[in-house]
Amino acid sequence: MDEAIRPINVQTTKQRIKSYSSNPGSLILAVLVGLAALITFLTLVFIIGYILVMGIPNLKPSLFQLEYNSDNVSMLPSIINTVGMTLLSLVIAGPLGILAAVYLVEYAKKGNKLVSVVRVTAETLTGIPSIVYGLFGMLFFVTALKWGYSMLAGAFTLAIMVLPVIMRTTEEALLAVPDMYREASFGLGAGRLRTIFVVILPSAVPGILSGVILAIGRIVGETAALMYTAGTVAEMPKSVMSSTRTLSVHMYTLASEGLHIDAAYATAVVLLIVVLFINWVSGRVAKMIKKG
């Protein structure tokens, strides 16, 4: 079998060499793409390696105590705050983004002007800097609604930030589901709503989860917006109206003060591990749902 495949591979390689020799522009583009991929990979390896080398030696058991004080800048309260902030933001933005995408794909008529306006708005919101979201959250949630610096104000601000990402990725995932799935479900007598929740959404779960993973990455790594809305109090929150400090804000605060740079590097390692762990869990969940 390998011998049968080998001539095809050789022939394909010869065809590529011939096409490159006849069209030098294709060769230049191929070299540039390969070079860009190599630079991206090496940059990622360098950043991760630098964080691990600088941060792992500074990881101490004292950094994982429940109490934060001037002598021990523990990150455990910030870890718990990060998990709570992420879950609360996803509870707000997840259903809204998914249901909005379902409406745009399954219910809105083709050529609907509302759909075009929503898509342009979502793409525009994706490109707005996070500090602008932070100023809006401070003026609206913190000041106008009088929520103060709280986890709830930060979660709503982050929900607005990640809503376009979840909505657009879910929309693309729903559009990728073949129309034959819908036709087969309708042919068996299922209604539109049942078809959406039983056939279409389960088929689009991997794409939807990719959007959720992107949203989680932005929530976990956000700093500017949370400083204006959630505050910087490094304590366990008593309620959603308490001021909190996430891992990214904790790391920024330690680095900006200049007194605990080693703890800031250790926090960066934990933040990296948290993001990788969330991505791994999301991937496992997507595979389980797809097999089920």
Image (cartoon, grey):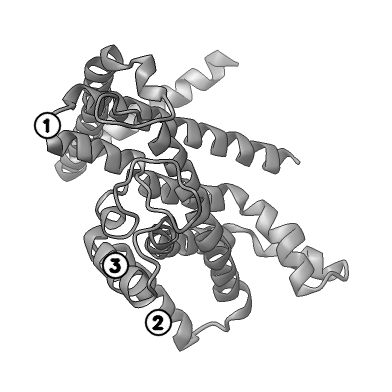
Above or below for 178 versus 20: below
Q: Which residue is mark 2?
A: 117
C-alpha separation, residue under disc 3 versus residue under disc 1: 27 Å
Q: Is residue 176 left or right of residue 289?
A: left
Q: How many marks?
A: 3
Above or below for 192 versus 84: below
**Label 1: how many residues lie within 10 Å, few (<14), some (14-19) or many (20+)?**
few
Amino acid on which the number 1 mark rests in the picture = Gly
Mark yes or no: residue 33 visible: no
Above or below for 183 versus 89: below
**Label 2: how many residues lie within 10 Å, few (<14), some (14-19) or many (20+)?**
few
Give the number of the disc on residue 258: 1
Above or below for 113 versus 84: below
Residue 278 percent across, percent down from the top left: 49, 36
C-alpha separation, residue under disc 2 versus residue under disc 3: 27 Å
Mark yes or no: residue 126 visible: yes
Looking at the rendered image, the quarter that the C terminus falls into is: top right
Residue at (38, 63) in percent of width and height: 157
Give SS at disc 3: helix
Residue at (41, 36) in percent of width and height: 77
Give SS at disc 2: helix
Say whether marks 3 and 1 touch (CB < 8 Å): no
Q: Residue furthest left?
A: 258
Q: Which residue is mark 3?
A: 138
Q: Is residue 120 left or right of residue 90?
A: left
Q: Of marks 2 and 3, which one's residue comes earlier in the chain?
A: 2
